[in-house]
Image (tube, rainbow, N blue to C red):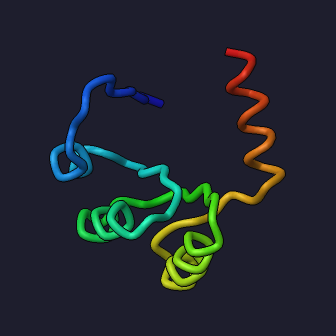
Amino acid sequence: MNARCLTVNTSLETILPYCNLLICHGRNGTIYHGIENKTPMLFVTSHFEQEWNVQQLEALQFGKCIDDDTEQRLNEILALN
């Protein structure tokens, strides 16, 4: 796995063509960029509107949403590093 984290502000239009996965909350602007670039998406929702968006995107197979248990486990793992 080759993951990189950017520490400078960069537009999604610039980096998404080079990304294998987009992790986001499921807000409209980010979703549109992901669809436009055909980038698979992993959603971590934090608001009911995002959950509505993501339900439709999952049905259309644009991405997957992680559940609360998975999110908690990821937070635990990240806290160890």
Taking 81 as reference, is 1 above or below it?
Answer: below
Height in image: 1 above or below 14? above
| Pick the front one: 2 or 81 | 81
User: Quadrant of residue 15 in the image?
Assistant: top left
Position above or below: 46 against 2:
below
62 and 56: which is toward the camera: 56
Farthest residue to the right: give it.
69
Find residue 72 and report its horizontal and vertical position in percent: 79, 42
Q: Residue at x 50, y 78 (%)?
A: 57
* Residue beneath the point at 56% across and 70% down: 50
Residue 27 relative to residue 42: left or right: left
Picture coordinates of residue 76, whole percent (x, y): 78, 30
**Residue found at x 56% / y 59%:** 43
Seen from the viewer's position, the closer of residues 38 and 23 is 23
Decide if residue 15 is on the left or right side of residue 4.
left
Residue 66, located in which quarter of the rendered image?
A: bottom right
The C terminus appears in which quarter of the rendering?
top right
Residue 63 location (% of width, % of height): 51, 67
Coordinates of residue 62 in the picture (x, y in percent)? 45, 72
**Up-down relation of residue 6 to residue 72 (above or below):** above
| Residue depicted at 54% across the width and 84% down the height | 56
> Seen from this angle, which residue lies furthest top?
81
Q: Residue furthest left?
A: 14
